[in-house]
Amino acid sequence: MRQWKRSVVVGAASIFFMAGLASAQSPSAQSPQSTPKMGCQKNFASMDKDGDGAVTREEFMAAPHRGDNPEEIFKARDTNGNGKLTEDEFCSGKGMGYGGKGKGATP
């Protein structure tokens, strides 16, 4: 009886271990934010014309926008009020971007 219990416990532990390995390696285990964030990073890089790591108000306003009021989006995302958006501010979704989708939304 004791051997049977040990076999069940070892078998169950093996199943959980294998399931953990499988889920850690699957593409669906990645953060759901990784894909939208990637698009946001590309948008940021395309707006940062001088490559200084920040999008100025002028750079932001020169880009095409799908939202109703890019000025308001810029102000909302410029959380420190310095007139420039870092990549984190740009991708934060504070201004809710296009269609109010929030994080990762295209401005």
Image (cartoon, rainbow, N blue to C red):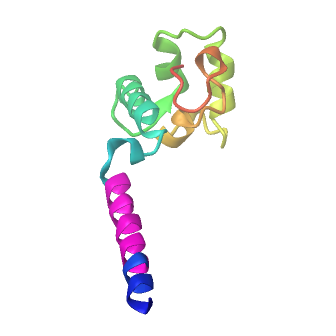
Is 65 situated above or below 1? above
Q: Residue furthest front?
A: 1
Classify the position of the C terminus by image quarter: top right
In front of the other: 107 or 105: 105
Is residue 95 one of those drawn in magenta? no
In the displayed structure, 36 sits above or below 65; it is: below
The N terminus lies in quadrant: bottom left
User: Number of callouts in the render?
Assistant: 0
The answer to which of 96 and 55 lies nearer the viewer is: 96
Q: Is residue 99 left or right of residue 106?
A: right
Q: Quadrant of residue 38?
A: top left
- Determine the residue positioned at 30% across, 53% down: 25
Apparent side of residue 60 relative to residue 22 in the rendered image (left or right): right
| Residue 94, horizontal then vertical, whole percent | 66, 33
> In the rendered view, does 21 fall on the left or right side of 94?
left
Residue 50: x %, y % from top left:
34, 30
Q: Main secondary structure of the magenta part?
A: helix
Residue occupying image coordinates x 46% and y 21%: 59
Query: Where 65 falls versus 48 (above or below)?
Result: above
Question: In x, y percent, where is residue 84?
Answer: 54, 34
Q: Along the line of sight, which residue is nearer the eye, 11 or 51?
A: 11
- Quadrant in which residue 80 is drawn: top right
Quadrant of the rendered image containing residue 54: top left
For this rendering, which residue is in front, 50 or 34?
A: 34
- The residue drawn where x is 40% and y is 28% is 39
Q: Position of residue 104 (x, y in %)?
A: 51, 30
Span of residues in magenta: 9-24
Residue at (66% x, 40% y) in the render: 79
